[in-house]
Image (cartoon, coloured by chain):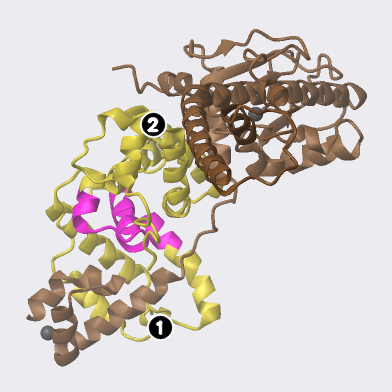
Chain colours: A brown, B yellow
């Protein structure tokens, strides 16, 4: 290493990660020592330039902004309106959901029933103590029955589990839409009663709605799988500034509340000021953003 | 100096881009969380405004999502991300009719200029009070750099990128990156020279 190599690596010396050979030469060479000292001083100056940390919800806001850009775009074509089910209407797979309830009233376990059927006696247990042979037979039969039941259950789960999960997800998506409609009604009522209120969003809007008695705080949480993780931050809501022409009314086509990106695996819900709800499929967002356009 | 902390933890950036291309929205969120601090800091230093940085952070990831399918698997993600952000920042500057880019590669500084500047200034950085004042001075000095030098210095010093990564991010040869860095550092050293050196 030479003075020339120190010269070559000066920017790294300033940054503090020059190769070891360079630092070694600089430490031993009188001519380079001052340069290294200057580099260290420059580093001190550069380190003084700090920037504020990003806001905590930067990513959430960016994702919501991306979603809203997709919604507002005339070329979206991906967003499709929901069937707008009336409140209380059964979900698409409503028949599947009562299944566990129908299975509940049994008193005896499935293993007991299968065992007693195999032993030929379904009645009350005999008061005469069973012999050793009877006990062994009962144990073997019980084990076989348990195995059989396990097999049946495994097959059942493999076949029906995805459908059940899908049904649960659909139900959550639908419940979420109900909540969003309530939020939209609350925001519309707030604007109606306070035509002079400024535009509000985030915690300020939450406080205005909840403390003003317009909405129960629990309704501001998305029932989707990720909604509860985010808690009070699972929806994005916005009260637009009053329209000078008609300050007590909200423009009907304006989105006022929507899901955070990823609340639901299928997409995200958005409600407009007039109570209309849309679900934007995730793949629709991706398509709008041009990924599958090639 | 602040590099990108924790960026290599867990899934690699490149694996996340592949998942994103496969349609996994969680991968996008993960990438955004990972670069929340570093990318926002970069944009903040380039644009001088935290709000503008918020906007361009979002725009950068819109482009990541849009072009994920075209992302070359053999490349690394970090320089690609910074190249997108740098181009967006450049457009922002142009639309705001900021000063034109002065070519930083012009041979106005010979190879010894940085040596002379650094050897001439000596001394340690000032105390805390001087340092906080220095933040504004550094910012102004970096602002005075031509656009391309500014991006290179911020990528090199504050984001901790290598010369190769900067070359990829700014789409210029590595040799050009090195000469720009020398020139930019020389200018900074001159601009930040202690007051007593001035008449
Ligand atoms: Zn030397
Ligand atoms: Zn939801």
Q: List x then y, in percent, for residue B178.
A: 17, 59
Vertical side of B9 occupied by A41: above or below: below
Q: List x then y, in percent, for residue A233.
A: 68, 41
Closer-to-camera residue (B106/A70) = A70
The residue labelled by disc 2 is B65
Please name the residue shown 29% across and 43% down the image. Answer: B14
- Decide whether the magenta segment is chiefly helix, strand or loop: helix
Q: CA distance from mark 1 to mark 2?
A: 52 Å
Write down the quadrant of residue A47 in the picture.
bottom left
Vertical side of A193 occupied by A252: above or below: above
The residue labelled by disc 1 is B196
Q: Chain of mark 1?
A: B
Specify whether tag 2 is near ligand 2 (CB below 8 Å). no
* Magenta-colored stretch includes residue A279: no
Circle 1 or circle 2, nearest the eye: 2
| Region rendered in magenta | B139-167
Q: Secondary structure at mark 2?
A: helix
Residues beneath discs 1 and 2 located on the same chain: yes
């Amino acid at each position: 290493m030479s003075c020339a190599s120190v010269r070559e690596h000066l920017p790294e010396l300033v940054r503090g990660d020059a190769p070891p050979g360079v630092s070694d030469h600089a430490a031993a060479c009188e001519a380079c020592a001052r340069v290294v000292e200057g580099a260290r001083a420059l580093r001190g100056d550069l380190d003084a330039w700090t920037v504020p940390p990003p806001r905590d919800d930067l990513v959430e806001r960016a994702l919501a902004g991306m979603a809203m850009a997709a919604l507002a775009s005339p070329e979206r074509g991906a967003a499709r309106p929901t069937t707008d089910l009336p409140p209380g209407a059964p979900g698409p797979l409503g028949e599947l959901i009562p299944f566990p309830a129908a299975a509940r009233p049994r008193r005896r376990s499935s293993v007991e029933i299968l065992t007693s059927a195999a032993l030929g006696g379904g009645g009350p247990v005999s008061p005469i103590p069973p012999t050793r042979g009877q006990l062994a037979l009962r144990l073997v039969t019980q084990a076989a029955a348990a195995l059989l039941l396990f097999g049946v259950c495994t097959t059942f789960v493999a076949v029906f589990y995805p459908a059940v999960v899908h049904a649960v997800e659909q139900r959550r998506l639908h419940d979420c839409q109900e909540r969003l409609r309530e939020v939209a009604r609350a925001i519309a009522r707030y604007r109606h009663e306070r035509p002079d209120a400024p535009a509000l969003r985030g915690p300020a809007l939450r406080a205005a709605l909840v403390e003003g008695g317009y909405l129960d705080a629990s309704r501001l949480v998305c029932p989707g799988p990720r909604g509860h993780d985010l808690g009070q931050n699972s929806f994005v809501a916005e009260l637009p500034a009053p329209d000078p022409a008609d300050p007590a009314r909200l423009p009907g086509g304006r989105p006022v509340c929507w899901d955070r990106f990823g609340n639901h695996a299928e997409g995200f819900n958005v409600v407009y000021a007039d109570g209309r709800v849309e679900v934007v499929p995730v793949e629709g967002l991706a398509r709008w953003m041009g990924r599958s356009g090639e | 100096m602040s590099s990108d902390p924790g960026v290599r933890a867990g899934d690699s950036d490149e694996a996340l881009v592949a998942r994103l291309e496969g349609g996994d929205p969680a991968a996008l969120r993960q990438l955004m969380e990972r670069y929340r601090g570093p990318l926002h800091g970069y944009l903040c230093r380039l644009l001088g405004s935290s709000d503008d940085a918020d906007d361009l952070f979002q725009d950068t990831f819109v482009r990541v999502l849009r072009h994920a399918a075209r992302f070359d698997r053999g490349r690394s993600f970090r320089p690609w991300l910074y190249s997108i952000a740098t181009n967006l920042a450049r457009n922002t500057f142009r639309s705001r009719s900021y000063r034109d880019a002065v070519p930083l590669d012009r041979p106005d500084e010979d190879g010894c200029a940085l040596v002379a500047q650094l050897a001439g200034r000596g001394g340690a950085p000032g105390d805390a009070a001087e340092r906080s004042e220095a933040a504004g001075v550094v910012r102004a000095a970096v602002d005075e750099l031509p656009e391309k030098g500014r991006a290179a210095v911020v990528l090199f010093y504050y984001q901790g990128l290598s010369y190769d990564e900067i070359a990829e991010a700014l789409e210029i040869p590595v040799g050009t990156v090195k000469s720009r860095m020398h020139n930019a550092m020389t200018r900074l050293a001159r601009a930040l020279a202690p007051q007593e050196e001035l008449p």
